[in-house]
Structure formats: C-alpha cells, structure tokens
Amino acid sequence: MQSIIDSEFRLTRIPALEANILAAGRVALADDFPAHLLPGQVYLKFERSLKNLHLQENRLRRNRDKDGARLEALQAARLEQEAANKKAQEQQAKQTAKADPQPPQPQQKADETPIGFEFSSAEKGEAATVGGTSPKAA
C-alpha cells in the first residue's frame, strides 16, 4: 500500500518538474533564439533531462499498476477467505445445535425477582434488614 502512495506522490510531481525544466530553459535561451524557435531549442538543450523524466514516469506507472493489481488480488483472496470462514462457522453452529440441543431453561416463579438482593441470617427464619433493625424489634 505504501508503494502505491509513494508512486502516486511522485507521479503527481512530474508535470511540475517538467514545467520547471521548460521554464528554466526558456529563461536561459530567451536572448539567444527568436520566440518561434525557442521551444525546440529548449527541448534539444534539456532533452536528456526530459527523457529521463518520462522514463521515470513510465516506470512509476507500471510499478503502481502492478502494486494495485497485487493489492486487489490480496483483498479478493481475503474476502473469499472471510466468506469461507463465516460459512464454516455457520455450518459448525448448525451441527452443534443439532447434535447437542440446549436443555430448556427453568422458568421463574411469579413471586421471585430476577434482579436484586436477598438478605438472610445464619439462623433459619430470621431475616436481616437494611439499617440494622430487625423485624422482631419493630
């Protein structure tokens, strides 16, 4: 992924570099050649730099395209693997459910509270109360 980002960054810089080379050539050769011959002379003088820049651009594009294709292949393989794992887990869950059914849960009585605390003392029949007073003392 980082190589794709780096290639894209470098590719976006190439037009600016090319423009800078041509502008520097126009400034350097403006006094020596008439205006209608200037672009050709600039190209001839900086031909090697411009060709190297174009070669670099083509190489970066090829590498970026190869890296992008490799990334897409890895993403597709990962998605296929995740789908296969999910399907296998679902099948395993179905087989487990068929082979070992869960026993029915006992239902709570209407007078039992599902949430809360029950306080009792060690002696049978004596209940502790909150606040320190016992029901017998009240």
Image (cartoon, rainbow, N blue to C red):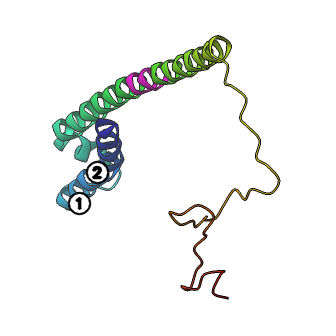
Asked if residue 66 is positioned above or below residue 12 in the image, the reply reads above
Q: Residue at x 60, y 69 (%)?
A: 126
Q: Please tell me whether residue 36 belongs to the stretch shown in magenta.
A: no
Mark sitting earlier along the chain (1/2): 1
Is 75 inside the magenta-drawn segment? Answer: yes
Q: Between residue 65 and residue 131, name the one nearer to us.
A: 131
Mark 1: amino acid: Ala
The residue singled out by tag 1 in the image is: 30
Marks 1/2: CA–CA distance:
7 Å
Q: Decide: marks 1, 2 in contact (CB < 8 A)?
A: yes
Residue found 51% across the figure and 23% down from its top: 82
**Does the magenta stretch mainly form a helix, a strand or a loop?**
helix
Q: Quadrant of the N terminus?
A: top left
Q: Tell whether 117 sits left or right of 68.
A: right
Q: Position of residue 137 (x, y in %)?
A: 63, 87
Dot label at residue 85: none
Q: Which residues are magenta?
A: 69-76
Where is residue 59 drawn, in percent x and y?
28, 28
Element under disc 1 = loop
The residue identified by callout 2 is 38
| Residue at 24 percent of width and 38 percent of height | 53
Q: Amino acid at mark 2?
A: Leu
Residue 125 screen position, x and y as percent: 63, 64
90 to 127, vertically: above or below: above
Near mark 1 (Cα within 10 A), the count class, few <14, some 14-19 or many ≥20, is some
* Residue closer to the observer: 99 or 87: 99
Quarter of the picture holding the C terminus: bottom right
Asked which quadrant contains residue 56, the reply is top left
